[in-house]
């Protein structure tokens, strides 16, 4: 007798798909660059800008409850960043780091909205279950490696720009390869090959940072999408009746929604704080 184990993992495509399906003809070549993840990033950016605009136009000298709440969030975020990179660098980097945090946070949480990643096209006509959706209509933007790699690359560009502005290019090279600890004389010559080797390793680690940042964010969000799709389609995967599967698709994912809300927030915090730490390591030096 042969036993077949049910498949519990709902597939989710690794590659973001082109958005040409949103248009009546495929001849619109300008849509080739527009993927379903870029479409979501446009929606998220628009939502953040609209939120910021509405908040900025309603500022009062005597703040109300909602203004007090958001001003407290801004103050806490500013204090955290100042505690890492100092007040002087925070004046330069706060706007970028806060925008980066908000974009990643909203993008992560946008992926938890009903229909994101679970509604789209498949080879089967008519109603599609979650596991039968091959091309999602909307793909979470941070579940696309192209987007997370782009965010990490832009972040490292600003890291390099601010570092060169603060210490100079040759100052950066000196900080990477010079003998540390105030060692002078013959001992410094003896130790120089070791610190040269350590400097090469540090350069390699800097070059790897964009990939490590992007893979960390992408891996967590992509895994979360797989988890949510699997829990949503668990009833169909186990072969239950349609009404039981429909009920399970609503009830079973609820605990995982709270988990993904927490993970989405933590990943935005980790990404932003790592960039802040990189800035601190290369621009803030004690005597």
Image (spheres, helix red, strand yellow):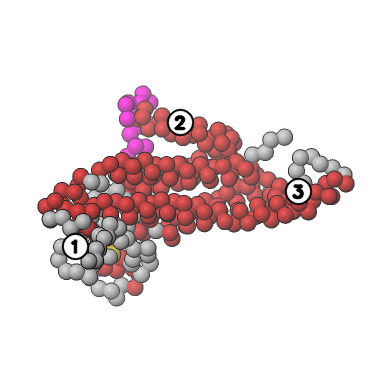
Q: Position of residue 36 (x, y in %)?
A: 32, 61
Vertically, is 107 above or below 87?
below
Residue that protrudes farthest toward the top in the picture: 62
Q: Quadrant of residue 71?
A: top left
Secondary structure under tag 2 reads: helix
Mark 1: few/some/many CA within 10 Å (<14, 14-19, 20+): some
Cβ–Cβ under 8 Å for marks 1 and 3 = no
Nearest the viewer among 127 and 22 is 127
Mark 2 against mark 3, which lies toward the viewer? Answer: 3
For label 3, the SS is loop
Q: Earlier in the sequence, mark 1 or mark 3?
A: 1
Q: Is residue 154 visible?
A: no
Residues at marks 2 and 3 touching, judged by CB atoms closer than 8 Å: no
* Above-or-below relation of 74 to 173: above
Mark 1 vs mark 2, foreground winner is 1
Q: CA distance from mark 1 to mark 2?
A: 47 Å
- The extreme bottom residue here reads 27
Segment colored magenta = 54-66
- The spot of residue 261 in percent (x, y) is 34, 42
The residue closer to the viewer here, 66 or 129, is 129
Residue on which disc 3 sits: 178
Q: Which mark is residue 190?
A: none
State yes or no: discs 1 and 2 in contact (Cβ < 8 Å).
no
Left or right of 146 on screen, residue 232: left
Q: Where is mark 2, residue-wise?
A: 75
- Residue where numbered disc 1 is placed: 128
> Is residue 31 highlighted in magenta?
no
Q: Quadrant of residue 90?
A: top right
Going from the N terminus, do you reach mark 2 or mark 3 first? 2
**In 3D space, how far apart are the residues under numbered discs 1 and 3 (Cα atoms)?**
62 Å
Could you classify mark 2 by the number of other residues whose Cα lies within 10 Å: few (under 14), some (14-19), or many (20 or more)?
A: few
């Amino acid at each position: 007798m042969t036993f077949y184990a049910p498949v519990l993992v709902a597939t989710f495509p690794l590659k973001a798909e082109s958005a040409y399906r949103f248009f009546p003809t495929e001849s619109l070549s300008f849509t080739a660059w527009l993927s379903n993840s870029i479409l979501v990033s446009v929606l998220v950016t628009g939502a953040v800008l609209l939120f910021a605009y509405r908040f900025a136009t309603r500022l009062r000298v005597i703040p109300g409850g909602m203004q007090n709440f958001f001003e407290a969030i801004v103050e806490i975020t500013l204090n955290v960043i100042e505690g890492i990179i100092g007040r002087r660098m925070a004046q330069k980097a706060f706007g970028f780091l806060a925008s980066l945090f908000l974009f990643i946070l909203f993008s992560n949480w946008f992926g938890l909205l009903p229909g994101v990643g679970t509604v789209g096209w498949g080879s089967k006509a008519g109603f599609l279950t979650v596991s039968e959706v091959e091309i999602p209509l909307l793909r979470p933007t941070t579940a696309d490696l192209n987007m997370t790699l782009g965010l990490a690359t832009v972040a490292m560009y600003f890291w390099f720009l601010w570092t060169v502005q603060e210490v100079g290019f040759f100052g950066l090279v000196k900080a990477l390869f010079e003998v540390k600890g105030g060692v002078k004389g013959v001992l410094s010559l003896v130790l120089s090959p070791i610190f040269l080797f350590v400097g090469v390793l540090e350069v390699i680690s800097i070059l790897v940072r964009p990939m490590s940042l992007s893979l960390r964010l992408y891996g967590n969000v992509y895994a979360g999408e797989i988890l949510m799709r699997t829990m949503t389609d668990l009833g169909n995967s186990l072969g239950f009746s349609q009404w039981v599967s429909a009920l399970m698709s609503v009830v079973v994912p609820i605990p995982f929604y709270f988990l993904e809300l927490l993970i989405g927030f933590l990943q935005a915090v980790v990404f932003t704080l790592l960039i802040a730490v990189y800035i601190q390591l290369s621009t803030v030096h004690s005597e």
